[in-house]
Image (cartoon, rainbow, N blue to C red):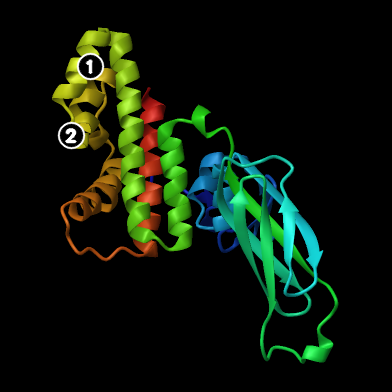
Amino acid sequence: MSFIPPLTCSNCGHSARPGEEGFGLSDTEVICKCGNRFTDRSSDQRVLSSNVFVRLGALSNHSEHGSAATPIGRARLVTFATPFDFVGRVYLTPIGFPFIAKEYFENSRGMLVLTSRVDGEAPLQEMPTSVQFNWMVYGLRDIDSLPSWQVLFYGATTHAVAGLFKAALLDYAVAFEAYLESFLAKRLTEKYGDALSQYLMRRAWRVEERSKDLLDLATGHRLTERDDVYQPWFEHVKGPRDRLAHGDRLTVGASATELAHSAVFQAIRWIESIA
């Protein structure tokens, strides 16, 4: 059992996150494979979902979608209604006639979608004068107003989606460290004043010390008291991060970053719950 367990259907007992196998999702309604429907509005469940569209939808504070048409072999300009500060992921879906579409960015106000015929997929004479595609863009706005850990966590998520698994794992690790530092600095200053808070933070600079001794000073709790929170973080985040930082040739794949994603997010949520 994890700190934030998956949802469970009251009718058949199926357990999963929204959007995962057996749990379809329509806005706030979860549709179980058994036909039961129930409401879930939890952002946490969506962040922890392995369904990339559900996850990005929960983590992004801005997204846009639409449809467009263009002759094959031409670039189609798509202008966003509101500019992004950071585009995390673009999904292009060709409709009908088989062709390839790829985005190209010159700025955050829009994108060029480049199109090309797939050689051999269909006779050239059958190529229509115009083809249509759907587009979906996830990203962030107002980055400067967001907590650093949130931006780092989002970056880790987009790295993982792009297949940059080592970069994702390192960013997940740093996201937790950034969150913990910000949380402790605020709470220790409130309890002991600015000077003592800074002294304590300088003295205990390792994340392991901070998650135990300093967290105890700030809240009366240690990360180690929740084995279902501490162990996943230690095994899937801190351990691999330390090995990578010291130059070990560690293989990191999709499953490793998925475990790191869950471990960091649940650790952050647990600390927030004891604040």
Pick the residue in front: 163 or 48.
163
Image-quadrant location for residue 121: bottom right
Image-quadrant location for residue 61: top right
Q: Which amino acid type corresponds to the residue marked 2 in the rendered image?
A: Arg
Pick the residue in front: 116 or 63.
116
The residues bearing labels 1 and 2 have C-alpha atoms spaced at a distance of 14 Å
Which element type, helix, strand or loop, lies under badge 2?
A: loop
The residue under the point 67% across, 83% down is: 118
In what quadrant of the picture does the C terminus appear? top left
Q: Position of residue 141 (x, y in %)?
A: 59, 37
> Would residue 9 be visible to someone looking at this image?
no
Image-quadrant location for residue 52: bottom right
Q: Position of residue 105 (x, y in %)?
A: 60, 55
Q: Position of residue 69 (x, y in %)?
A: 81, 65
Query: Which one is earlier in the sequence, the residue at label 1 or at label 2?
Result: 1
Residue 206 is labelled as 2
Residue furthest out toward the right = 129
Pick the residue in front: 44 or 118.
118
The residue under the point 35% across, 24% down is: 183
Q: Which residue is mark 1?
A: 198
